[in-house]
Image (spheres, grey):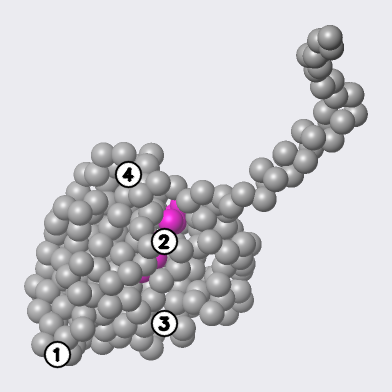
Amino acid sequence: MLIPLQTTLVLSPSIRMKTLLFLLFLTALLPAQKPPAARKPAAAADGWLLTFADEFDARELDLSKWIPHDPGAKTPTPETVSLSDGLLHIPGTISTFGLFAQMYGRFEMRFRGATGSELILQPVPSGILPRIEIFRMTAADAVALGNWWGSEQTERSYSDTFGVSGLSRGFHTVVLEWTRERIAWSIDGKKTFESGDGVPHQPMYLVIRGVPDVDYVRVYQSPRPQGSQ
């Protein structure tokens, strides 16, 4: 009578090392994960139509969408931006000057900021008036919202500053809805500010400065004619 013997497979140290290296190689091939709560770019629930979006999933800044310097500068400075793990890091300035501009619509950005971070809209073809500050961080937990109009001699503005807990420690979403009659700001889904004074009626482009981490930027247009917004 034969009695089966229990056998144990013993791998040599060299085989174990090769197996470990192979598993590490497979792990490296897995895609990096974006921070939680990022949403796919799609038409907003209230019917806005997507006209511009960047999820920053590439390895380099998309130069078909952004110029990597201040609109007033002539020399590109790509070293002022970097991308990693689905996030854009901007110690300097980028803008859509000459590449994308829009009159009216919904402008949205998810970000982690720092004092001095800002996202603004400036007029086509040039100048700084009229101007809409979608947000400008005046402190680690404070943000300024507002719009400016007029000329250098007659400049006027309507703005205010608001406290936002954890603005520099976690990700937050700011939304600007700009129609013919008004401009409204929301932070993390909560309506924060509104202006009916000096509402601009011309295309404007985006400028982003000094934002440590940007998850995405999305711009929408109302399906209704612009004059009826």
Q: Quadrant of the N terminus?
A: top right
**144 sits to left or right of 73:** left
What amino acid is labelled 4 in the image?
A: Leu
Question: How far is mark 1 from mark 3, CA to CA?
Answer: 20 Å
Which is nearer the N-term, disc 2 or disc 4?
Answer: 4
Q: Residues within 10 Å of mark 2 (few under 14, many from 20)?
A: many
Name the residue beneath numbered marker 4. 167
Which is nearer the N-term, disc 1 or disc 2?
Answer: 2
- Magenta region's main secondary structure? strand
Question: How far is mark 4 from mark 3, CA to CA?
Answer: 28 Å
Range of the magenta residues?
211-218
Question: How far is mark 2 from mark 3, CA to CA?
Answer: 16 Å
Q: Residues within 10 Å of mark 4 (few under 14, many from 20)?
A: many
Q: Which mark is residue 104?
A: none
In depth, the one of 202 and 224 nearer the eye is 224
Give the vertical position of 225 relative to 185 (above or below): below
What amino acid is labelled 1 in the image?
A: Gly
Circle 1 SS class: helix
Name the residue beneath numbered marker 2. 216
Circle 3 SS class: loop
Q: Quadrant of residue 12?
A: top right
Name the residue beneath numbered marker 3. 100
Q: Are marks 2 and 3 in contact (CB under 8 Å)?
A: no
Question: How far is mark 4 from mark 1, CA to CA?
Answer: 35 Å
Name the residue beneath numbered marker 1. 227
Circle 4 SS class: loop
What amino acid is labelled 3 in the image?
A: Phe
Question: How far is mark 1 from mark 2, CA to CA?
Answer: 28 Å
Tag in front: 2 or 4? 2
Tell me where residue 195 appears, x and y as whole percent: 12, 68
- Asked if residue 44 shows in the view, the reply is yes
Magenta span includes 128: no
